[in-house]
Structure formats: structure tokens, C-alpha cells
Image: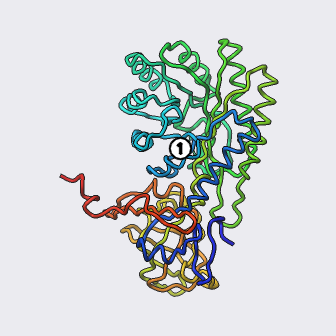
Amino acid sequence: MFVSDCISINEKGHLTVGSADTVELAKKFGTPAYVFDENEIRGNLRAFRNSIEDNYGGNGLVCYASKAFSCKEIYRICMQEGTGVDVVSGGELYTALSVGFPAENIVFHGNNKTPDELLMAVGNGVGRIVVDNLTELETLNGIASASGKTVGIMLRIKPGVDAHTHDFIKTGQIDSKFGFALETGEALEAVKAAITMPSLKLRGLHCHIGSQIFDIDPFELAAEVMLGLYKQIKDETGYEFDELNLGGGFGIKYVDGDTPIPYGEYMKNVSAVVRAETEKHGLKMPFILIEPGRSVVGAAGLTLYTVGAVKKIPDIRTYVSVDGGMADNPRYALYGADYQIICANKANEEKNMTVTVAGKCCESGDLIQENAPLQSVEAGDILAVLSTGAYNYSMASNYNRIPKLPVIMVNNGEARTVVRRETYEMVASCDV
Ligand SMILES: *Cc1c(COP(=O)(O)O)cnc(C)c1O
């Protein structure tokens, strides 16, 4: 019925998340607001950890891809659950370090890290910097030599695997801004350069083939391609890697018909490929890193809005306008993302309307969803948009000078604020 396991309906007919009544949450914390179920997040992290434990003898590390949802509390949760994190900017790195996240378990990504960001990562002892290109490799080598440290790196490779997903979020193919191409020999060249740099320790290679992927095959193929490259590198240079980073991209359920891979299945199949390929090529079994982002937090979060105007345009459509929009959820405007939407205070009622849910921004494209089935709503009702835990808060903007939403964390019915709502003063705070 609901796309997310942590969602239910209580005796009042109200929608609940993590056993908390969303109508009460809207009253207490105001709308619009993001709400997360903490147990769902922790459960997902544990499921990924256990999958490595059960299928690969625990010889690996789950690194939560924090661009999906980044704030101090999520880094604390990852720390408590014993996972690593991946960061893609100085801001994410700063936030992780600010709560004492162990730098050795931080993986630093990005296709154009600035020298300042690299300096910050080296200075703080980040365990693995994933180098994207030759310019970065040279810059980093310079920074590392000057610091007198040996810096752990991986190289990002485009394995050329088509992940059957939306074009905008497909990153493993040759025409991508991320990483070194395999087909052109660029990857091999980068490896050869990196192993001659005395201040850099090349721990392994990385690939990330896309996002919101529902098939296991492309992941298996990527692992096979990467280990083929490991073999080629060993043959040509004698160098053998200790680690292999297989990225993230596991799909989640946004609407009925989405069929996520059970996390255990993924690791079971992929570790079988890793075993078979290392054996075939006479390589040592690498320490494995995986980087789930969306699948850790996506279905654990929802957004609550209050309905304002309901505009019925005869024979055309009905616009239901809410007190948020593309500033807190740009995903529909960006790539037509699907969502399940429920009227939280009428969750038991039948959905007998088809509506377009619109935001309050001055932009016609500011929509949360078109042609969405919904209960019969009126001004003052509370809407819940499900599975907004990933790439919503983290992609939010202050368009129209709208203050960013708070993040409320629910644990067994108890709710607390983990990110406060922005005020108008905060929105204007950098203005001179
Ligand atoms: C975005 C990203 C991830 C996480 O992707 P999800 O689809 O959210 O799981 C992992 N690794 C890298 C390098 C990424 O860029």
C-alpha cells in the first residue's frame, strides 16, 4: 500500500512515520518539514553491513554516500553503526569532521575538487581520496609531498557499463564528466602515473555506474570489468591493488512498480563474481567498499506540507498548492521524478481525485507531481510526499528567499529536531 515500510495509518486514520502521527508532527514542528524514521536508516545501514559480513567474510566497508542527505546527525548515526561515509565537497567533509567522524573512514569524491578542498582532506587525514583526472592527480601529489604525508588514493574509472537508468543519472559510460575512461587507455595511463608518485598510496580503483538501478547484472558486469583491469595492470606493471570500490546506485521504491533489489542479493551475487574473477586472474581478494546513498535514507524520509489553494480548472486539471515546492524538492522539476502522495489527515479515505501538486515558487515548472491520485483535499489539509529522504534536503535551495525546512528525526514515536528551520535572518545573513 505504501512505498515505504516505516509508513502506516493509526486509529485516528492519520498517516504515521516510525509510529509518530504525522498530523501531530505537522502541528508541533510546523510545515513544510522533512521527517525521517531513524530506525529505518539504521536498519538499512545494518543490512548493508550484514550483507558484507554474510557474503564476503566482513572484508569490506559500507561507506554511506552522504550527498544523498548530509547533516551532522546522519554522520553521528553512521559513526554509531560502524560505517564509513563518502563526501563530495569541502562542506560535506567539514560537517562529517565536525562531529568527530574518523577521517580514515571517509572517502572523498568529486570530479573537480579544488586545491583548497584537497589540502583540507590531506590535512585532516582522509583515508581515501578518489582521484578523478590527471590534473587532480598532480595537484594532490604536490600537496601530499609538501605535507610530508603519504595519502591514500583510489582512481575513479568509467567501466563503460550501461546501467539501464535515466540518462541524467547514468555515469559509468564513456561520455561522462566523471573519471578515467577504460576504452581509451586513459585509466591504465593514470594508474601508471599514480604508482610512481611517492607521496600517494594507490589503494585501489573505484567505479559508480549510476543511480536508482533495479538490476544486479550491471553491478556484476562492472565488478568483472574492474577485475579484468586489475589483471591487466598486474601483468603490465606488477602492481596489485588491496581494495576495490564498487560505488552505490541501488534503487528504491518511489511508486508501485518500482522493484528494488534486496540488499543481501546484491552482495551475494557481486561477491560471487569477485571471488570467481580474482581466482580466474590469480589476484588477491580485495577489501571491498560499497557506497549506498539513496537506498540508506530515501524511503526513510517524507515531506509534510499544508494545502493552501485548490484550483479546479474545468476539463484541464486541478492544482493543489502547498507551502513548499521546488526549493525543498527539485527532483520533479529536474527529472520528472515520481512520488506517492497521501493526505495525512485523511489517510483512510479513498483517493478519488487526480491532481497536480504545485509549490509556491514563482516558476510554472515548480511542481511536486502531475496526475497524482489523491484523497479529496481542501485548504488546511496535510500532505505527505513519501520517499523524499534522499536528494531533497541535500538539493534544497533558497529560491524566492524561502527558508530551508527543518529535519525532524523520529525514533519509536518520539520526535526531535536534528536540523532547525531557517529563519529570514539566516537567509539574509551573508548579505552585506
Ligand atoms: C552518488 C554516488 C553514490 C551514491 O549513489 P546512490 O544512487 O545514492 O546510491 C555513490 N558513489 C558515488 C561516487 C556517487 O557519486
Query: 250 or 412, which is in the foreground?
Result: 412
Is 28 positioned to the left or the right of 429 in the image?
right
Q: In the image, residue 344 lies at what x, y percent?
A: 55, 78
Q: Is mark 1 within 8 Å of ligand 1?
A: no
Would you say residue 132 is visible in this rendering?
A: no
Is 32 positioned to the left or the right of 348 in the image?
left
Snapshot quadrant of residue 37: bottom right
Is 236 positioned to the left or the right of 27 in the image?
right
Would you say residue 169 is visible in this rendering?
A: yes
Query: 172 or 196, which is in the foreground?
Result: 196
Disc 1 is placed on an element classified as helix
Q: Quadrant of the N terminus?
A: bottom right
Q: Does 5 sit above or below residue 194? A: below
Snapshot quadrant of residue 193: top right
Q: Does 98 sit above or below residue 393? A: above
Q: Does 241 sit above or below residue 169? A: above
Snapshot quadrant of residue 83: top right
Query: 197 or 242, which is in the foreground?
Result: 242
Q: In the image, residue 81 lies at what x, y percent?
A: 58, 46
Q: In the image, residue 244 lies at what x, y percent?
A: 65, 30
User: Which quadrant contains ligand 1?
Assistant: top right
Query: 189 or 80, which is in the foreground?
Result: 80
| x 25%, y 61%: residue | 425
**Residue matched to label 1:** 79
| x 71%, y 49%: residue | 263
The amino acid on which the numbered mark 1 sits, given as a three-letter code, is Met
Q: How is the image coloured?
A: rainbow
